[in-house]
């Protein structure tokens, strides 16, 4: 049976536990040889009745999930894989309530699963953006006019982004986007991120935020004044504005409310889909599964609750 290319085909394909195991093993261990997560030995044997391996060197038992975002999960692999397919390819995201109904787990389990998949979507690339690069910032938080009066008075004490979470984004035109939560938009903060992610000598397009001043001569910096116009030839930040609109449509339309503590993972999710927009559903899915190793996320880490089990 050929590999699936649609969600319906994926549900059918991964209905067999052995097929699921073989598929994940082929991506976790690309050379096809299971590796012990404790001692890295390749000498092991397979316990077929339990679908796990036992290391001949140190005696540790391990599964295809060990050391991955699926570690210690009681959710079966078929549900995990179908969930990953849906999350990777839902343009506007998928809520924990929708996922819990779709794969038959509790809403709490679906919420935890979603965040673990987002952890696998995190971009660990060390390469820098180059060529034509746009930089822009946005503010994530509730709309003042939709807040109850007492909440509005408690949170809003000024204009614009006061009380909201600041996100800085960098986009290589016709290429990759990177977005991260930042504590402020001061010059040191903004320029540190630009220098970290953008190759010197690149063309940098920004708005008139004063924090970008001083990036010349390391970058060919050009500014668009949004008070006058949004496009001046090649000088604009429309690519980043497009990404912000997609992000906010996801947060406001699907997730409704996102806590600042978790926002980084939602940024990873949206950036992943944006950066793989030219691929097929199957390619996006396979890439996520191939990135599950070494990204374990526990419930305690996720909630920041030291008392959590």
Image (spheres, helix red, strand yellow):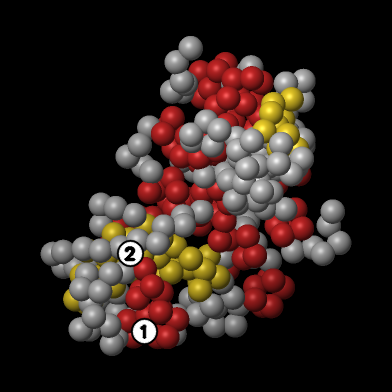
Which residue sits at x=38%, y=43%? Answer: 276
- In this view, the residue farthest toward the left is 233
Say left or right for 94 vs 60. left
- The CA span between labels 2 and 1 is 21 Å
Residue 211: mark in rendering? 1
Say which element carries label 1: helix
**Residue 151 at x, y percent in the picture:** 69, 71
Give the residue pinned by disc 2.
128
**Residue 68 at x, y percent in the picture:** 63, 45
**Front residue of this view, candidates 179 and 247:** 179
Which residue sits at x=69%, y=26%? Answer: 46
**Residue 32 at x, y percent in the picture:** 52, 31
Report whether residue 88 is seen: no
Q: Quadrant of residue 22?
A: top right
**Front residue of this view, candidates 175 and 230:** 175
Which tag, 2 or 1, sits closer to the chain's start?
A: 2
Which residue sits at x=29%, y=59%? Answer: 172
Which residue sits at x=59%, y=20%? Answer: 19
Say which element carries label 2: loop
- Rendered position, 36 above or below 85: below
Count residues near mark 2 (Cα–Cα under 10 Å), then give few for <14, some for 14-19, many for 20+.
some
Count residues near mark 1 (Cα–Cα under 10 Å), then give few for <14, some for 14-19, many for 20+.
some
**Front residue of this view, candidates 179 and 130:** 130
**Residue 155 at x, y percent in the picture:** 65, 76
């Amino acid at each position: 049976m050929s590999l699936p290319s649609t969600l319906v085909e994926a549900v059918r394909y991964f209905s067999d536990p052995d097929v699921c195991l073989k598929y994940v093993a082929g991506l976790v261990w690309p050379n096809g040889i299971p590796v012990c997560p404790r001692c890295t030995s390749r000498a092991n044997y397979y316990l077929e009745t339990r679908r796990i391996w036992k290391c001949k060197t140190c005696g540790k038992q391990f599964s295809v999930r060990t050391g991955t975002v699926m570690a210690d999960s009681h959710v079966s692999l078929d549900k995990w894989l179908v969930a990953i397919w849906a999350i990777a390819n839902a343009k506007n995201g998928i809520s924990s309530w929708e996922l819990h109904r779709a794969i038959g787990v509790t809403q709490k389990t679906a919420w935890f699963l979603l965040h673990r998949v987002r952890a696998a979507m995190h971009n660990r690339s060390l390469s820098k953006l180059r060529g034509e690069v746009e930089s822009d910032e946005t503010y994530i938080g509730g709309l003042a006019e939709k807040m109850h009066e007492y909440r509005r008075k408690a949170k809003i004490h000024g204009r614009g982004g006061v009380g909201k979470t600041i996100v800085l984004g960098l986009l290589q035109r016709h290429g990759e986007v990177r977005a991260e939560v930042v504590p402020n938009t001061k010059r040191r903060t903004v320029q540190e991120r630009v220098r970290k992610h953008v190759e010197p000598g690149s063309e940098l397009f920004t708005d008139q935020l004063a924090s970008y001043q001083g990036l010349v001569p390391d970058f060919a910096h050009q500014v668009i004044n949004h008070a006058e116009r949004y496009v001046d030839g090649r000088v604009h930040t429309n690519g980043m504005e497009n990404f912000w609109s997609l992000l906010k449509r996801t947060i406001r339309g699907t997730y409704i409310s996102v806590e600042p503590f978790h926002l980084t993972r939602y940024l990873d999710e949206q950036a992943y889909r944006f950066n793989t927009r030219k691929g097929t559903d199957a390619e996006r899915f396979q890439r996520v599964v191939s990135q599950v190793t070494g990204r374990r996320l526990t419930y305690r880490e996720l909630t920041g609750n030291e008392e959590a089990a």
